[in-house]
Image (cartoon, helix red, strand yellow):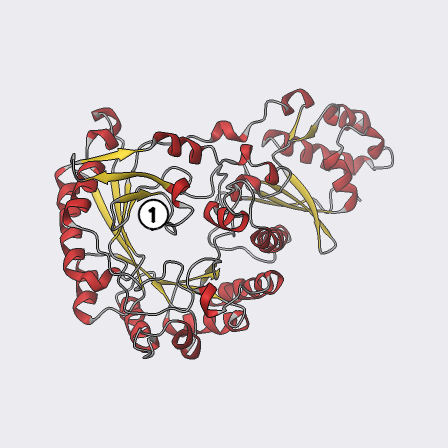
Amino acid sequence: MNHDRIKNCVANLTLNPRASVFRHNGGFYLFDPATRTYASMNEPMLAFITNPDDTNLFDEISNNECKKIEDVVNHLYRIGILISPESADKIDMCSEFESHSLTTQLVLFVTTKCNLQCTYCYAHGGDSEKTISRDIWRLAMDYFFSPLNLGTAQKMAKVKNVNLTLHGGGEPTVEFAILKEIVADFQERANSEGLQSSISIGTNGTYNDSIYQWIIENNINVNISLDGTRDVQNRLRPYRSGQPSYDIVVHNLKGLVKTGRHVAFRATITDETVETMNETVELAKELGIATVHFEPVTLSGRRATTGLARPDAEQFAEKFLQCFLLGLKHDITVKWSGLRCFEHSNQQFCGACGQNFCVTPDGNITTCYEVLESNDPAAGIFFIGNVDLIHGRVVWDQSRIEKLKQRITENIYACKGCFLRYQCAGDCPIKSFRYSKRDLYSPDPYRCQISDRINKQLIAWLADGLIFPRDVEQASIISLNHHII
């Protein structure tokens, strides 16, 4: 009777197409992005999961095991991993995605001036000296706080927080007077609207003590670039004079740590520095850093003339995984932009897909942090408007916005069947563009190789109970290894 009951229970069930099963390092794993379920399983359970209506699988199973299988089936059906075949065509992860027109983050690229001469700079920082004018940033801010953006009173009632991010092309702190004016204006406008404001700044970390005090007094979130140990940092990120930058950056990082902040830094990795990644995590522990973000050097910018190359994909992935485990040991979060398996489902990789509102020193509006100049071939895709000083308004190119918003998982053929498609969503759009020479829908296979290795390994470790990162919340981690013997 138990056999008949379990056969009836699983009859006409199939695996939800959003879920994936894969083999990795000799093990079998199930990953469901919607419920963030991570499961390990043995080979008989794999056969059951992938073909649950094959009732012949149960002919030699004991009565005791039947009850366990029934519990598994009920659980997987309840959370939507097993479904009826007629429902399979109706499963659409895109229905959970809403492209919001409301913008609550304003990004200002303050200047292209820079006091460093980083050997790989994607923006050729410091090679030109353009700074955003008061007229441009004020008009951008006028629009940002206007009903045109924040919407009707009903929509505005839902907005509680607004964010200003100060970024570069160059180093924002070299225009400190302008920074102070921008931040004060933003905070005043937010307060007048009854909104809570937050300010972030991306910096190379070479600012002086007066700027440091301003950062602390205004509770500004700081994202600092530090490529690693003294030798690495000084070689890759020297001052324009050739002088080393390591000591001042570390001094400022230590200052932030002393205030009790959650401090992070970003390290760009080349083929020459990939072997030093572990040392970078150890340095972070010594400094009291909470988060280290590793990123392979990009294909664009100054790297082309200095001869620096990206690290081997497999080597970067292996070193990253070592650093991830080392980070767990030291209570340090180790990140990479393609580490997506712990995140909730998303149909777009980032806000560059028609969401971001970033204003360049020239007054162009870009959605991508890496596309700042009008002579960049990518400007024709990612420039979605401009600040019109003549008519005193912000002008949008709605056709470009809509085109970018179409870059979602459902529309990226190369991602169909990928286990990570509903988190990665085609990876970084600008990196796809630069790799493929103008195609947003052809992900860079280099980054796909890294992503496949890192995310599958972390899913496996999590499902096997070997790790439990603090970033994983509201996830289901189950073992199916012992339910079919």
Q: Residue 35, relative to residue 243: is it above or below? A: above
Q: Secondary structure at mark 1?
A: loop
Asked whether 241 or 199 is in front, the reply is 241
Q: Residue 293's spot in the image, x, y percent?
A: 44, 60
**In this rendering, would 73 be left or right of 388?**
right
| Relative to 461, 343 lies left or right | left
**Visible residue check, residue 371:** yes
**Position of the C terminus by quadrant:** top right
Mark 1 neighbour class, 10 Å CA radius: few under 14, some 14 to 19, many 20 or more: few
Q: Quadrant of residue 101?
A: top left
Residue 218, placed above or below residue 9: below
Residue with the mark numbered 1:
374
Q: Position of residue 368 (x, y in %)?
A: 38, 46
Residue 418 placement, left or right of 283: right
Quadrant of residue 39 within the rendered picture: top right
Q: Residue at x 47, y 39 (%)?
A: 348
Quarter occupied by the N terminus? top right
On screen, residue 368 above or below 321: above
Residue 474 % position (x, y): 49, 43
In the image shown, does 5 or 433 lie closer to the viewer? 433
Q: Is residue 351 visible?
A: no
For residue 270, side relative to residue 155 (left or right): right
The amino acid marked with disc number 1 is: Ser
Which residue of the protein is positioned furthest toward the top in this rendering? Answer: 86
- The residue lying toward the viewer, choosing from 273 and 120, is 120
* Residue drawn at 43 percent across, 72 percent down: 228
Q: How many marks?
A: 1
Quarter of image, res 202: bottom left
Across and down, in percent, residue 196 comes to: 21, 43
Find the residue positioned furthest to the right.
60
